[in-house]
Structure formats: structure tokens, C-alpha cells
Amino acid sequence: MTMHHPTLPAGRPFQPAPRRSHRLAVAMVSVAASAWLAGCGGSSSTPGPGVVDNGQRLFSASGFNCVQCHTDPRTMQRASDEAALAALIGTAITDNRGRMGDPSMGLQSLDAQGMRDIAAYLLSLTPVAAAPAPAPTPAPAPTPGLPAGVTQQSGLPTGYVACAREGSGSCTFTGTVTLAYGVANAGPYRLRSVNGPSFDCRTGNSVFGDPTPGAEKTCFGPGGQVNTIGGGGGGGGGGGGAVTVRTTTFATGLSSPWGMAWLPSGELLVTEKRGTIVRISADGSSRTTLSWGSPRPDIRDGGQGGLLGIAVDPDYASGSPWIYFTYQEPGANSTSGTAVGRAQISGNSLTNFQRLLQQTPKVGWDGVHFGSRLAFRADRTLLVSFGDRGQDNPSSPNANNAQNVARSLGKVMRINRDGSIPGDNPVVAGGVPGLFSWGHRNPQGLTVDAATGNIWETEHGPQGGDEINLVQAGRNYGWPLRSYGCPYGASGGESCRVGGGVHAPLNGVTFTEPLTFWVPTSIAPSNVIVYRGSGFPEWTGHLIMGSMADPALWRITMNGTTFVSRERIVTTLGRIRDVSQGPDGWIYVATDGGSIVRVSR
């Protein structure tokens, strides 16, 4: 989830504020060295107009990523004043959270006053009203119709339930406790510790969909490693029963790994955002960085762009030894766009490079929302996801970019593996060659189910509204005219949702609803797969997805193409950038920390 910057002209570089004192900035940052970023929401003081104006100028001229400042995805706390928020911004820059420390963001040279000015501007957007004194919460009555073993825990707000499927039945726990949902449409329910935090184990349309009687999910106790995943159901093979998972490091020391693809030999190819492809042996014990021959792609590493998705030709071992990749390609006048290329591996080199497709138009380089993933269909055509490059503003949505079929911003494209256009692509008047679907924001996940041919896509919303979509030819997925997310700085609730949230028709244009979405806070979903391995037969046909703002590996329980529920499988690996099913049937994830991790039993 990233911030749109409508006032930053394409191609104009950021001019940072003069550095006053690096020591001041470091001292200020250290105040919140262990804090996670909190809200762009309300202030306890009223800064002068000059401060706010300067903060707006600095904010608009930078590559600022507001997902790292506007809200804490777990606690939903908000910063109380500009000093506190400035400290949190400084921590994010120092720790390079969300790549805010990347030189292309233009934030490293900010001094302490500049950070406070930006904080004052952000806090001025949505002032927080004084909170009323909390009313005493009476002990709730037992909720009727709950499954056996579930009780209404005393001391919890109405609608909160806990059960004794594991442990002593108390809500004051430190490990894993299973929450059993109530009857359909009786929720939402949330598991909450009496003497600790509440945990994100909710039901209801905003999180898990309508609860299913007797369904189980796992909630996370403070500091506990999640290792027990409740039942499942649906999806061809999913059934009940707990599944124990463990994680094993497969490879470390990578530089911003972005995409993974397996060669027929069992070796793993990993793209590094800086522009290199690493080949890792089948057992993870050795690696080689492949060198680019001539010609080579012009890859620019900046902002969210660089070397991104990767795919191996499905006929690699039988006469078509190509690998495919997407990358930020610079253009004239400091512009760039996502491009698709392919090359062949010869020894330790990448040769015979060919550019197959480029995003049009190119806009100011670096910045945000490049996408991008690749996925082959059974007919050997190649699907590619392109982001909207931050050109669509949820505060003033229009049809100029992701909704404009003549541009490839915010689209899923379909090409032949030589870059030509399939003759059976959807026929859309004025459509850009290769157009398959449109109305996407920043699709960083794309996969084709080998068993069914279904195409699944994940994309980042603005402030909330992250989505999983079933992509179909010729469909419009709504962005930026429809989204369950809100403009940045909005106070929350359903009233701020872009276009009302629900993907209702507009002026004769129809939109396709997402399979599921996350509100009010974004999780920043990364790649997604349909699990078809032997390691977890209970999960056959379910979606496995990574996330970054709320770092986790997720299982999305499916019944065919119908969403059933979702849950976190692992939460201890940091930001998960990519997910892949290995030849051994286990799940592999790439983390922003530079590791490839195997998830197995």
C-alpha cells in the first residue's frame, strides 16, 4: 500500500531540504527506535500555517510511503503530536521500512525540523476529536448457538468469545488458542486477552467473511510462535484437523529478493531488486549470481521499481529454454515504466535478451506501483500485472489511467511468449494491445491454478482495501472508481470508502467485486499461489499468500472459487515478498530481509 503524490510532476527530481544537523536527526530517531509507525491522524496541538505548508511541500516533493506512517496495522494506535510522529518517521527512514530509507524516496537528507514539519502536515489532515470517557462495559450474556466448548468469557465486551479447545479455557494466555466461531451471521467475534492486547482473529465481512458454524481459526498470543492451524474445509482437499508447520532457512544473504522461479533441475532462480538474478542449488547449499551478456535489459533500481517478477518457460526442458522477468525500464526525460523481457541461461550468463512488452505511457521514474508478476496459462500465453504507477488518486478518482483501456497502467496483460498478441484476447474498443483486464491499482501477486486454469491476483489498496481477485478476461475491477479502501488521511469507517466501496455499476460501467478484502488497515499483500503440493494435502486448492505491512504468510480457505475464511500461518519471518511452491511440495517464501525460507511440517 503506497501513497499517491498528485503534485509531483513526472520527471522532476526531489530537491531535499538542507541538512541542518545529522546529530539532531539521529538523536530524534533514537527516541522511537523500537516503535512501529503510528497514525497520520489527529494532533494534540495546532502548528502554525507556515509549518504545515512547509510539511506539505516536503511531503509532496518526496517519494513518501504513507503506509509506514498512517497507522499501526496491529494496534491501530495514532501518534498524539508531531514530535511523536516525526520520531516514528525517522525510525522508518533509519530502518528502511517500506524502503523509506531508499535514496530515491528523498527522505535521508531531512533534518529533525523537516520531519516535524511533515508530521505536522500529516496530522493536520484529520484532526482527532477528544475521546469521550469510556462507559462501563457490563458483563455480556452468553451468546446463544455457539458450538460446544465455547463460552462468553466474563470481562470481555459484548460479541467477544473464547473457547477451551486448547489450554485451560482462560483468555489470559501466552501461546496458541483456537477460536471457534458462532452461528452464521451471529458475529463478528474476536478473541481478546483480559489482561493483554486483542488479537486479529475476527469474523465478519471485513476480515474472514460470514462465520461458518464450527469453523476454527488460530489466534495469536503475545510473543507466541504460531504452530497450530485450525480446520479448513472446501477447496477440493481441505478438511479439518490441526496442521503443525515449521520453518527452515533455505538461503540467506540475498539483496532484496523479489521473485522466485524453479528450473526443471530443481534449482531456484531469485531476482534481486538491484538488477541481478541468483541461481541457488536444489539443496540451497550454493549459489551463483548470473552475469548479463550483451544485449542486456536496461534495469533501473529506484523507488519500488527494479528487477521484479520472474517465470520459467513451461517448456524449458523441451525446446524453449527461456526465463521471463519484469523490471523498471527508464525512458526519456527521467521517466520509466514496467517492462517484460526474456533471456536464456548459458553457463553462468544470461544471453539472448529480448524485450517483449513495455508499459505505456511511462511516467516519472522510480516512485511507486510497478506491479509486477508473471504467470503462464496452460495455452502457453503469458500474463503480466502492471501497476497504476501512482497516477490514480483516491481523493479525486477519474478514468484517465487504470480505467483507461488505451493505457497499460493498472492492467493485467496477456501476450504470447515471443511478445506477440494472442488473437483471442478480449476485444475492447481502443484497448492497448495485450489488454486482458483493467481497473487494478498495484497488483503484486498473480498466479494461474494449474488444475483449473483460474487466475488469481492480489493488489494493494490505498488506506485499507487490499484485495484478492479472480481475474477474468475483459473484466473491470474498479480502481480508482470503486475500492473498499479510503483516501490517505481519512478517519476510517465505511463512509470514506472510495466510490462507496461496493463495486456497483457507474454510468453503465460494471465492476467486478473482489474475492475478499482487508479493512480498515492494509496488509500490503505480495504474491499468491494455489497450493497443489503433497506436503499439505489438507490445503489442496487453497490460496497461500504473503504480506508485508502486516508481515505474515496467509492461508485463504477456498471452496472452489468461493471464499470461506483466511488466517495467518506464520508471523515470525518479517515482510514476505514472494511465495512459491517448491518441487518437494513445501512452501517457500522470500523475505525482504534477504532470506528464502521453507515452510514444512
Image (cartoon, helix red, strand yellow):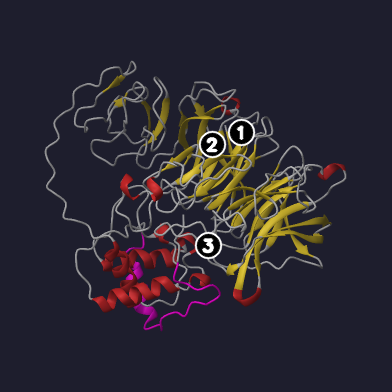
Is residue 556 visible in this depiction of the protein? yes
- Which callout, 1 or 2, points at the residue further toward the start of the chain? 2
Disc 1 vs disc 3: which is toward the camera?
A: 3
- Image quadrant holding the C terminus, namely top right
Q: Is residue 50 magenta?
A: no
Q: How many marks?
A: 3
Q: Residue at x 42, y 33 (%)?
A: 208
Q: At label 3, which amino acid type do we have? A: Val
Q: What is the spatial separation of the Cα atoms under label 1 and label 2, in whole angstroms?
A: 17 Å
Q: Tell me: residue 72, above or below residue 119.
A: above
Disc 1 vs disc 2: which is toward the camera?
A: 1
The magenta segment is 6-34
Binning the other alpha carbons within 10 Å of mark 2 as few (below 14), some (14 to 19) or many (20 upward) gives few
Q: x, y (%) of residue 359?
A: 65, 60
- Which callout, 2 or 3, points at the residue further toward the start of the chain? 2
**Residue of label 2:** 246
**Residue of label 3:** 368
Q: Residue 393 occupies which quadrant of the picture?
A: bottom left
Label at residue 531 = 1
Quick one: SS at disc 1?
Answer: loop
